[in-house]
Amino acid sequence: MNNKACMHTAEHILTAVMRQLFNSPRNMEMHLGEKKSKCDYAVPRAISVEDAAAIESAVNAEIESDDPVSYEVLPMDTAREAYDLWKVPPGAQTIRIVHIGDFDATPCSGEHVEYTVQVGHFQIKSYSMKDENTVRIRFSV
């Protein structure tokens, strides 16, 4: 399995979990690497050891659910009503939406796995508060 596709799919799941647990909008910054990746999220308070364990557990639960990963292409006007289109290039007429079962749907042009179980085990390597309302999570799969 392509590790880049695994990392990218894990990032989508992590972002959805952060939205569910901390009402975080999309990640503010990210870097996806072959062995380790990092994402920054706005959070209402500092993340605790227990929070990190809950995040890791929720991400792995979704991975283990073996949801299909599928795509649809929508006209920009339709997508704008339902999705955050902050990274869409100017002048785009359509946008690809990546669906992870019923768990998440996000505009994205990247590479992903076909089923979440293909991601493998998600592990938070470390996390730190960049400031009082931004956490950086470093992870691997």
Image (cartoon, helix red, strand yellow):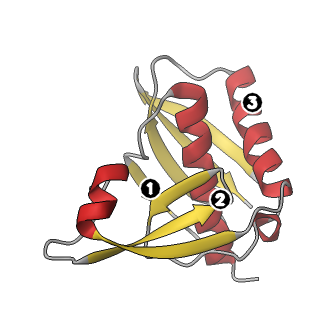
Q: Which residue is mark 2?
A: 10
| Mark nearer the N terminus (3 vs 1) | 1
Distance between the Cα atoms at labels 3 and 1? 21 Å
Write the residue at 14% across / 71% down.
90
Instruction: Give the quadrant of residue 50.
Output: top right
Q: Is residue 13 above or below residue 88?
A: above
Q: Residue at x 54, y 47 (%)?
A: 15
Quadrant into which the N terminus falls: bottom right
Binning the other alpha carbons within 10 Å of mark 1 as few (below 14), some (14 to 19) or many (20 upward) gives: some
Q: Which numbered disc, 2 or 1, marks the residue closer to the eye?
A: 2
Give the image location of residue 74, x and y in percent.
37, 72
The residue at the far left in this view is 91
* Amino acid, disc 3: Ala
Q: Secondary structure at mark 2?
A: helix
Asked which quadrant contains residue 25, the reply is: top left
Q: Residue at x 56, y 37 (%)?
A: 18
Tags 3 and 1 touching, CB below 8 Å:
no
Q: Which residue is mark 3?
A: 54
Q: Secondary structure at mark 3?
A: helix
Disc 1 marks which residue? Answer: 30
CA–CA distance in space, label 3 to label 2 = 15 Å
Label 2 – label 1 distance at C-alpha: 12 Å
Pick out the residue farthest to the front.
78
Q: Earlier in the sequence, mark 3 or mark 2?
A: 2
For label 3, the crowd category at 10 Å Cα-Cα, with few meaning under 14, some 14 to 19 and many 20 or more, is some
